[in-house]
Amino acid sequence: MLDELEPWSGLLSDPKRRAAYEAYAEGWEGRIGAFLQFSPDEPAGRRGAGQAAAKPAARLAAAGPAGRDPAEPAAAPTTEQGPTGALALVPFAVKDNIAVEGFRMTCGSRILEDYRPPYTATCVARLQAEGALVVGKTNLDEFGMGSSCDNSAFARTSNPYDSALVAGGSSGGSAAAVAAGLVPFALGTDTGGSVRQPANFCGVYGLKPSYGAVSRFGLAAYASSLEGAGVLGRSIDVVEEVFRAMVGVDPLDQTTVAGPGRPGTEAAEPKSVGVVRGLGGLDPAVEAAYRGALAALADSGLRLVELDLPMLDYVLPAYYTIATAEASANLARYTGIAYGRRCAGAENPDDLVRRSRGEGFGDEVKLRVLVGTFVLRSGFQDRYYHKAQTLRRAIRDELAGALREVDLIAMPVFPTQAFAHGDSGMDQFQQKMADKFTCTANLAGLPALAVPTGLSGGLPTGIQLLAASFREDRLFSCARRLAPAFPLPEPPSFSREFLR
Amino acid sequence: MKYASYVGLEIHIHLLAKSKAFCSCAARFGDEPNTNVCPVCLGHPGVLPALNEEALFMGYRVAQALGCELSRRTIFERKNYFYPDMPKNYQISQFAAPLGVSGGFEFEVKGETRRLAIRECHLEEDAGKLIHAGSVTLIDYNRAGFPLLEIVTEPDLKDGEEAEAYLRSFRRLVRHLGVCDGNMEEGSLRCDANVSVNEEGRGLGVKVELKNMNSSRFVRMGLDYEIRRQTARLAEGKSIQQETRLWNENRDVTETMRKKESASDYRFFPEPDLPPFEPGEAFLERVAGLAIELPLGRKRRFVGVLGLAEEQADQLVEEKSVADYFESALALGAEARTAATWITGELRAQLLRSGQDIAASPLGPRRFAALLGALAEGRIQGTIAKQVLKAVLDEDKDPEAIIAERGLEQITDRGALGAMVDEVLAREAATAARVRSGDKKALAFLVGEAMKASSGRAAAGTLKEIVMERLS
């Protein structure tokens, strides 16, 4: 087990330390509201330690196609003699759009307010198989749609560095919980930057793995071809450890592939970093931090190579067209019929569906479902959806070409630092345009990592690294080179006392 | 004015795969509601489909039997529409690259062979079932996710009779392939149609879709009604509306279900959760390896090579198990026409009576061939053979054993037969006298009495000879 995880292991089974931990968490939660459910005591949270977790996973595992071994992912080194895995008895938090049996999964939406999933997501089950314990579910923008966490139906999450500011989103709860030291790592989902941007706002590491590296089974879908589970952590070692526990083919997600970069693959040190020419529109503090990070990359011995990526201008239109199109179908299942919120007094099935959805969804969700329905209309697909797919291929090809010339690409994560609740200083359109740097990796299916680079004006800054598909190893090793130059910042009243 | 009609069919078949199309739940009829369900087929948040290769394989087999080009890269799409019994409110289906396209299938109608062009075959999932019970509506999701294969034909059929004939041939095909039980009453084979009428020589008319025809007979009646309706409207100078109509089997008419304006826009787009399926050589070789002789070809061989009557050959190929049984018996030495007559006659009747299936009955092809052998050699005769057949089915013994046990072999010994005849003549002296004085009718009576005395075992020709000798 990693040295820094040792103190966390067994924390919850030690009554004295747990009490101190709960008091610490309670103090923070009053200020930041990272969790929608926090229950370190609840047996369900510890299922990974016993056979209980294996049951639903095994039942579902049988859903795999004939001829494959469905039991492949769940080979847990635990059960009778107690957990012995790399994450044994280490608590962690899970974004509330990822299914964990024993917890509700609200997706930050009224429509799933009381929904309890009857199964556990593969990525969580794999961490549980390593002995890790879910302590709670973290806040998010409804169904992952947003970049502030203000867009949750239940709570807003504040930035641990300044509670007047947002934590970012949509995995803002996970980022805030990790930054405040409430968990050593947390899971998020990243559809267009939803792990990396809040990690950047809260000063922690945020990894979005390659598409197909980590199973999506159990992630409430927003935009299936873009999203995946990601990791937020306070050190690159922890992030890598968690990634290694989650990665791999899952028969329940047929878009997973066995790529290079899996555990045991030879890791070659990166030598060059591509720097995109002519990136405008950055806040001065972000610009300065970005330049500083590039200088640190050069100091660490990496060769900086200037790149032109003209297709970046098309990232946003392509992204929002595809994301909303997929969302319009993915969210069609929420009707109040078989589960979830049901309106009162429906007169017939159509009425029930219409009103349950009307009451259950927030405005941003409705907007995206409407846009997605619009771009998919027959007769208009060539103008919108098909054109977006064409752009997507061109973007992917351009990045793949660039990543044959250089080992990594560096970019900012977001044009601003954490902004104030309810006021990003940007209108809705600008706020979406600001996702340009993060959405790129999602469209191209590439792994990307937000690396914290200290504070500026008391708020975290960071840089984003992208690598070729399944070359997460290059992200990790580059982040390690940067670490000495940028010690991880700690928010005011951060403490690890309870771990002692 | 002469009018032409154009009919195309959309046939859905439930594939007999063990599990549903995208999860491991059993694909089985008749179970307690909502017992064959899991988070995947219930469409819970976060679940993903996992393609059932067995269902896809069956789909490829049907496509091949229908002469389609088999796709080397088939993709799945989402077909979006809201319906209360559809868990995800989109159906995983195929649109741009279905598993098979551009086929053709021969069938017989009105004594002719026709070839119907097949547009495509694609795999999709079924929905659940709404059950309206008083003031509430219940949903059974057992059927949700059943693998369905949809076969779309070109509009090359002329009328209800052709459509019914095609549908019957198609049903026979999928039963032969063993991929569908073809039961239209239970809905494991469903047929919708599109039909248009236009002045001859002017191509397709305005298309009307026809649904709710729950038997091949209703398909014929529905189409014929609809063609008459459209023709009458055109003859009156009225136009046809593009719409969907339902067959009302109680009133024998079609009725409007929805007009074109309220038709859905399905907003197809590629299913991001399923990668394209690329069947490898091994997969396609397995498909080819399981190709069967098509029922129609087999029938022609039975008529042309074996000299069977059309009707008899048709009866034999109706079920693959029957045709296979027939050919097995032939391989074991049975004579074709005799075997065909027995299979379609006495054996069929006896199996119906005992409720047995030919493939699993105690009278396997070997015993059947042995029975026909004994008959051909004259060791038993027809009526006795029927008794033996029944005894084999009832007692599960070899025909030879039954013949021996019961002493059923034909009696040909002239001495033994003479003794029987003499006994009859002594008993029926008055009748015998009438024969001697020229009453031919009485002769048959005496032969019949002698046959009775032998319990039906006497060789008939010899017996008659002896009676005539004695009375001459």
Image: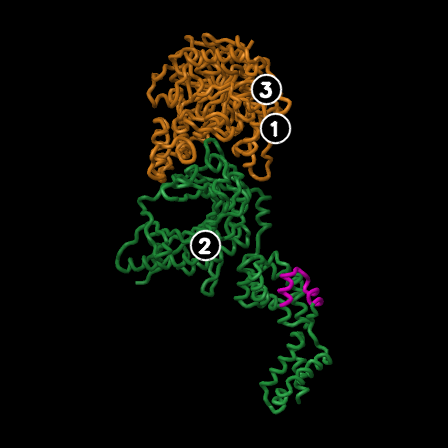
Q: Secondary structure at mark 1?
A: loop
Q: Quadrant of residue A257?
A: top right
Residue B330 in view in this figure: no
Residue picked out by circle 3: A88
| The magenta segment | B387-405
Nearest to N terminus: mark 3 or mark 1: 1
Q: Nearer the viewer, residue B153 or A43?
A: A43
Question: Horizontally, is A338 left or right of B236 in the view?
Answer: right
Whether B19 is among the magenta residues is no
Residue at 64% from the left image edge and 77% from the top image edge = B452
Q: Which mark is residue A75?
A: 1
Visual hue assigned to chain A: orange
Q: Position of residue B289 (x, y in %)?
A: 60, 50
Q: CA distance from mark 1 to mark 2?
A: 51 Å
Frontmost residue, A206 versus A220: A220
Residue B117: image tag: 2
